[in-house]
């Protein structure tokens, strides 16, 4: 089955994507590599995912509506797992507009819009 997983640079997203790949699914991963977290760790998780033979790759940022549209058109996922979000309460309190833009608009609204079609 073709699955699109958002949040693949994160702990839960990377493990979920690897589980999908290991059970034989074709997976496309999305993730924001922002610097609110350890970028090297996030890149390492993304690399593990992308190097798997069942991976359809992608480092697309879910806040990029054009990239989301392109991934849906190219990979035609049958299932979507949305795990992308900016964690950390302090960051949300200090940068609420950035947090909502990344966690709500980007990570969920863009994905939900394309699952309707």
Image (cartoon, rainbow, N blue to C red):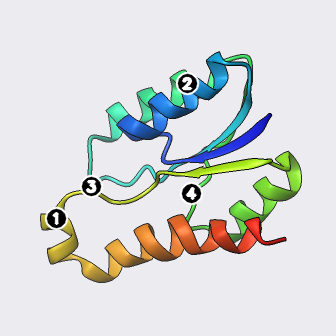
In the rendered structure, find residue 9 and report the number of the disc placed on it. Answer: none
Residue with the mark numbered 3: 36
Indicate which label's residue lies in the foreground, 1 or 3: 1
Number of the front mark, 4 or 1: 1
Mark toward the start of the polypeptide (4 vs 3): 3
**Dot 4: element:** loop
Rendered view: 88 above or below 31: below
Residue receiving disc 4: 61
Percent x, y of residue 67? 70, 61
**Residue in front for this viewpoint, 16 or 30:** 16
State how far apart marks 2 and 3 are (Cα).
23 Å
Looking at the image, the residue that sits furthest to the bottom is 97
Q: Which of 19 and 9 is in front in this view?
A: 19
| Among numbered discs 4 and 2, the one appearing first in the sequence | 2
Q: Residues within 10 Å of mark 2 (few under 14, many from 20)?
A: many
Q: Name the residue under label 1.
A: 89
- How many angstroms separate mark 4 from mark 3 (CA)? 15 Å
Mark 4 vs mark 2, CA separation in Å: 19 Å
Who comes first in sequence, dot 2 or dot 3? 2
Q: Quadrant of residue 96?
A: bottom left
Question: On the picture, is 97 further left or further right than 105?
Answer: left
Sooner in the amino-acid sequence: mark 4 or mark 1: 4
Q: Which residue is drawn at 54% across and 68% down?
A: 108
At a point 19% along the width and 66% down the height, the residue shown is: 91
Cα separation between marks 2 and 1: 27 Å
Q: In this view, does 65 lie above or below 42?
A: below
Residues under numbered marks 4 and 1 in contact, where contact means CB atoms less than 8 Å apart: no
Tell me where residue 78 appears, x and y as whole percent. 80, 47
- The residue indicated by pointer 2 is 18
Q: In terms of secondary structure, where does tag 3 sit?
A: loop
């Amino acid at each position: 089955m073709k699955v699109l997983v958002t949040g693949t640079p994160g702990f839960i997203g990377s493990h979920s994507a690897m589980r999908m790949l290991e059970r034989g699914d074709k997976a496309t991963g999305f993730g924001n590599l922002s610097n609110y977290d350890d970028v090297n760790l996030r890149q390492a998780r993304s690399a593990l995912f992308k190097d798997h033979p069942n991976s359809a790759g992608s480092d697309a940022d879910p806040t990029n509506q054009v990239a989301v549209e392109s991934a849906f058109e190219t990979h035609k996922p049958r299932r979507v797992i949305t795990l992308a979000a900016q964690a950390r309460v302090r960051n949300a309190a200090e940068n609420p507009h950035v947090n909502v833009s990344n966690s709500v608009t980007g990570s969920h609204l863009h994905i939900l819009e394309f699952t309707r079609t």
